Image: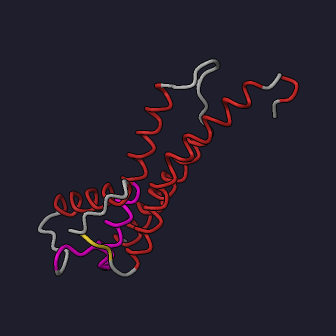
Amino acid sequence: MMDLLIMFAMFIASAGVIVSLVLLLRNQPPEGRRISTRNFIILIIVYATVMSGFAVIYMGLELLGQSVLVEGETLEFTSLGHLIEDVMYFSAVTMLTVGYGDITPQGIGRWVAMVQALIGYLLPVAFVVTTVIYSEERKLPKTERL
């Protein structure tokens, strides 16, 4: 039963990541503005959601018995709080493509980390591209807009 609950949490976290990315891609700045405080806040929320979502995936895999993160020789967590701290830290470092190397992925965790790093690398690009496309579209007469 506990494994099913953990897998459900991982599914919800994955869905949250996808919804956050869609929200970022669909959000446009208000008419007449190039820089939007709302866009900046949404970008921060998307980053936080994606980091938290991947942290839940790492934690879920660890709790299901799949060792996905290694700190030194092994990842030893003395409490759930320590595990949460480690997976959130690793998720943030991977998402922001810093990669200190003190905690490293192994096994399926490597694949999850690669996907997360790719998303972290592409998020600012998606943000800028949607803003530029919207800006260019706004310059067209209303009859030529999509």
Q: In the rendered image, which quarter contains the N terminus?
A: bottom left
| Residue 22: % across, % down | 59, 46
Between 88 and 128, the residue placed more toward the observer is 128
- Residue beneath the point at 74% across and 30% down: 137
- Residue beneath the point at 74% across and 24% down: 139
The answer to whether 80 appears left or right of 139 in the picture is left
The answer to whether 140 appears left or right of 8 in the picture is right
Q: Outermost residue, left direction?
A: 78
Location of residue 14 with respect to 75 vertically, above or below: above
Between 78 and 26, the residue placed more toward the observer is 26
Location of residue 11 with respect to 76 vertically, above or below: above
**Which image quarter: residue 25?**
top right
Location of residue 131 with respect to 31 vertically, above or below: below
Q: Outermost residue, top direction?
A: 32
Q: Count numbered badges in the picture.
A: 0
| Residue 23: % across, % down | 56, 41
Q: Is residue 63 magenta?
A: yes
The answer to whether 90 appears left or right of 30 in the picture is left
Q: Is residue 111 magenta?
A: no
**Which image quarter: residue 108?**
bottom left
Q: In the rendered image, which quarter contains the C terminus?
A: top right
Q: Which residues are magenta?
A: 53-72
- Residue beneath the point at 68% across and 37% down: 133
| Residue 85: % across, % down | 21, 57
| Residue 11: % across, % down | 48, 62
Say how the picture is coloured: secondary structure
